[in-house]
Image (spheres, rainbow, N blue to C red):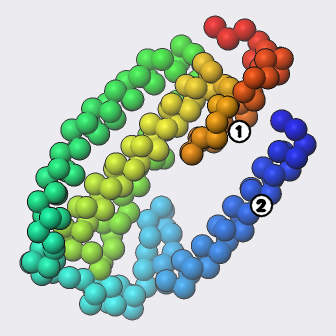
Amino acid sequence: MNENVGRLHEQIKTLQIELDAELAIIRNQLNYRLEGGRARFEEEMLRAHRALRIGVAKYVVNASPLVILTAPVIYSMIVPFALLDLFLTVYQLICFPIYGIERVKRSDYFIFDRAHLAYLNIVEKINCAYCSYGNGLMAYASEIAGRTEQYWCPIKHARKAISTHEHYSQFAEFGDAKSFRKKYGNVD
């Protein structure tokens, strides 16, 4: 990696630390703290949240008919999601030890904390859990695929990728055969 790219990566890390600090200030203003990985609100904030909860009946009556009609389509994705989850887990359990790749810790990618928000009704909590599962699964899949790519083909693409995993920046540049062979030797 050249000097400018390394410097820019360091700036990104510094900005991420600064962003995290700003988000901590916002969390503090919302009167919650993390205890044992779980958000805890002050009692006054919990009362305010409960007052803003919309009952299930009102929530459903006010929903767009098209939203209600498409809900089964959205929820039908649970089948391919669950299959993908199963296959990803089995894949890495079998292949990663053989390749010497560190396994992806599944629990790091699935966060189900929104169910503790007092201003959500049961339907909203189920919707939030579903989205948490789907998005967590995609992040889990991306990390497994990224570690696999790092092992088998750690070369950047010629075109800019819209989204990349955290390992991508360390890959060899597209077309830089000397650096690739120097860094990775014979990949087999």
Q: Residue at x 16, y 74 (%)?
A: 63
The residue tagged with tag 2: helix, strand or loop? Answer: helix
The amino acid on which the numbered mark 1 sits, given as a three-letter code, is Ser
Q: Residue at x 27, y 32 (%)?
A: 83
**According to the image, label 1 marks what residue?**
169
Q: Quadrant of residue 188?
A: top right
Asked whether, in this view, residue 122 is left or right of residue 108, the answer is left
The answer to which of marks 1 and 2 sits earlier in the sequence is 2
* Vertical arrangement, residue 17 with respect to residue 99, above or below: below
Q: Nearer the viewer, mark 1 or mark 2?
A: 1
Residue 164 lies, in percent from the top left, at: 59, 41
Query: In the rendered image of this protein, does residue 168 appear above or below residue 66?
Result: above
What residue sits 37% from the left and 24% below the top?
Answer: 90
Find disc 2 in the rendering and name its residue.
14
Which disc is residue 64 wearing? none
**Secondary element type, mark 1:** helix
| Frontmost residue, 58 versus 86 | 58
Q: Which amino acid type corresponds to the residue marked 2 in the rendered image?
A: Thr
Check disc 2: other Cα within 10 Å, few if <14, some if 14-19, many if 20+.
Answer: few
Residue 94 visible in the snapshot = yes
Q: Mark 1 touching mark 2, by CB under 8 A?
A: no
Residue at x-position 28% and y-position 54%: 130
Q: Residues within 10 Å of mark 1 (few under 14, many from 20)?
A: some
